[in-house]
Structure formats: structure tokens, C-alpha cells
Image (cartoon, rainbow, N blue to C red):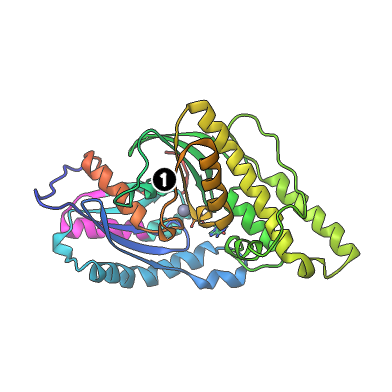
Amino acid sequence: MQKLKGPDGPVTILAIESSCDETSCAICRDGMILSNIIAGQAIHEQYGGVVPELASRAHMQNIVPVVDAALKQAACELSSLTAIAFTQSPGLIGSLLVGGQFAKSLALALDIPLLAVHHMQAHVLANLIPASDRPEFPFLCLTVSGGHTQIVLCQSPLQMEVIGETLDDAAGEAFDKSAKLLGLPYPGGPLIDKYAREGNPTRFSFPEPQIPGLNFSFSGLKTAILYFLQEQTTRDADFVQKNLADICASIQGRIVSILLNKLKKAARETGVRDLCIAGGVSANSGLRNAFRLLGEQQGWRTFIPPFEYCTDNAAMIAITGYYKYLAGQAAPLSVSASARAEW
Ligand code: KG4
Ligand code: ZN
């Protein structure tokens, strides 16, 4: 492990996130986010999902301008950086390698420490970005993204335990695959959210899987939606078009109830009263509203990161890097990116 040699003055971290199809760079000083630049990749829309090879290429094109913009917006010189943080895992390996190699080169050139960050841990710690109104430890976090669905028990910034997770599809995948069945473009989650606002969530009923413990399953829901749509469109070819808002509201309502019923169980079993949500799906308005309402009913304190810190962003990598820096957890320059999700 590299020895930390930060100055006695402010701790300024430059962080890079490139695990999937967003290239992002953030600057954080003493735990405050000064900039958070995110470049999306529209190229994947036409393929109905993220194409790994194209994602890596787009990261290569975006990374220098994104880092430049983050430094400019933060009015920060490279010479004032204390450490470089980057997403080491999990994610698409080609995408992770672009951000990882860039971060290593920068750390080597500036002769400052490198901080390797776990993407899912960072989603959880996005809840610690706001300067006030933050959860207190221990807290529970429902992390819902395109690749993961987890309930995490957090004892401190770097001490976390996954106490429940999906056995098959992630919540974001459930949204995106349902949207695909409805003929909506990728990523479909935000579109289901949009149409659901005008719809009746009790109009159509989809099954809630009976999974023991705190784990989740979404593959049965996907199959139920497929059969439901096949049956309805055989009777009326325009069924989806005529009922889009109600279908979206009913699908979203079921995904949200699956998530929140397990979170309620986790809160009951652990006795924890500070609850958070994080990850791309926490941008969903139905989940945000239902989570707040459930919190009021259950007497929880509820926390949701600001919108820009819900979907993939480097600010969450920066804040996690900051805690790692304070804990003296620098990574060697030989550290390599990993597609796998182990903590
Ligand atoms: O955390 P994230 O940005 O990337 C991963 O780490 O996977 O999450 C992306 C996922 C996608 O599945 C996307 O459809 C979903 O988050 N998502 C939403 C909404 N915004 C993003 N799902 C439902 N409603 C939304 N408003
Ligand atoms: Zn993510």
C-alpha cells in the first residue's frame, strides 16, 4: 500500500467513474463536492442496451474533456490535488480499464496516492454527500441500479454488509426489460416513470414473488408481463398504445412494492431507523414517493441523494475516495480493474 503523503491543508480528490456508459469526473475538497461532470453515451440507444465495445471507445473520447471540465468548474489546478480516486469494480471491464488506466497515469505523473473504489459502496455513500441532513450510522441502504439490487447495513463509511440481494435480475433491469416489452427505447426505466405518472397503478395486477429472507427476484415478474402482453395484444393489437400509462403505473407499482416490502422487513429485523435509497432506480419518482410515505408510517428517518448523485456519477466515487484517504487506504499502482462485484 502506498504511503499517504497529503498536505496538512485541504484534502482535494479528483475522482473518475467509468464503470458502464457514463464518463464522469468530480472534484471533492474536504468532503465537499466542487464539481461533478457527467458525459452520457447516446450511441447505445439504437442498440437497445449498452454495447461494451462502443462504451469503451466513447470513454476514450470523453475522458480528457470531462476531466478538464471538472477541474475548470472547481477552479482547481492539477498541482493542488491530494489523491486520485477511480471506480475499480464492478462494471464492464473495457470501460473500467479506461478510467482506471487514466487514474493510475495521473496519480503516477503527479506522484500522489491512488484510491480504488467499489461502485456499489460509492452508490451507498452518495447519501453522505449533502452537507446537512445526512443519515447517522448505523443505517440501511436500498441500492437499486441497472446491475444490482441490494440491502446494505452500514456501520461506518467503510464498514458495510450486504444483507439482501437479487437472485436474478436487478430492479433497473426489471424496469428496462419491461420497457423493451412495451416497445420503449433503452434505457426504459425513466420512460416507465414518466408514463406511470399519468396512470392507475391498480388497473393491472402483477404477481409479487415469495422469496425467503431479504433477497429479491424479478425474473418471474418479467415473464408475467410478457405473457400478459401476449394475451392482451392477441385480443387487441393496440392494447399497449391504448393503455400505456396504466400498464407502466402497474409495473412500477409492483417493482416498488417488491423493493419496499423487503426494506420494511430489513428494518424490522435490524431495528435500524435511518433508511436510505441509492442507485439509478432511486431516481424513480414512484419509489421516492412511496419510500418517503412508508418512512412516515414506520417512524423512520428517510434519505434520498440529490437526483444527480442517484445515477452513475463521479461525486460518489470522490466521497468514497475521501473516506478511504482518511482511513489510509491507498491502492498500489499495480491494482487492476475487476468486472466482478465482490466487496
Ligand atoms: O446506477 P445506474 O445509473 O447504473 C448502474 O450502475 O447500473 O442505474 C441505471 C439504471 C437503469 O436500469 C435505468 O433504467 C434506471 O437506473 N433508472 C430508472 C430511472 N432512472 C434511471 N429506473 C426507473 N425510473 C427512473 N426514473
Ligand atoms: Zn451505478
Along the line of sight, which residue is nearer the eye, 325 or 245?
245
Q: Residue at x 30, y 53 (%)?
A: 318
Q: Is residue 112 magenta?
A: yes
Q: Is residue 321 left or right of residue 59?
A: left
Residues in magenta, as a range: 99-114
The quadrant in which residue 63 appears is bottom left
- Kindly identify which residue carries mark 1: 124
Along the line of sight, which residue is nearer the eye, 343 or 206?
206
Q: Residue at x 14, y 53 (%)?
A: 10
Q: Residue furthest left?
A: 8
Q: Quadrant of the C terminus?
A: top left
Q: Is residue 86 visible?
A: no
The amino acid type, in three-letter code, at marker 1 is: Val
The quadrant in which residue 273 appears is top left
How far across and down, in percent of the image, does residue 184 sit?
67, 67
Q: Residue at x 37, y 46 (%)?
A: 125
How far across and down, in percent of the image, does residue 56 sit?
45, 64
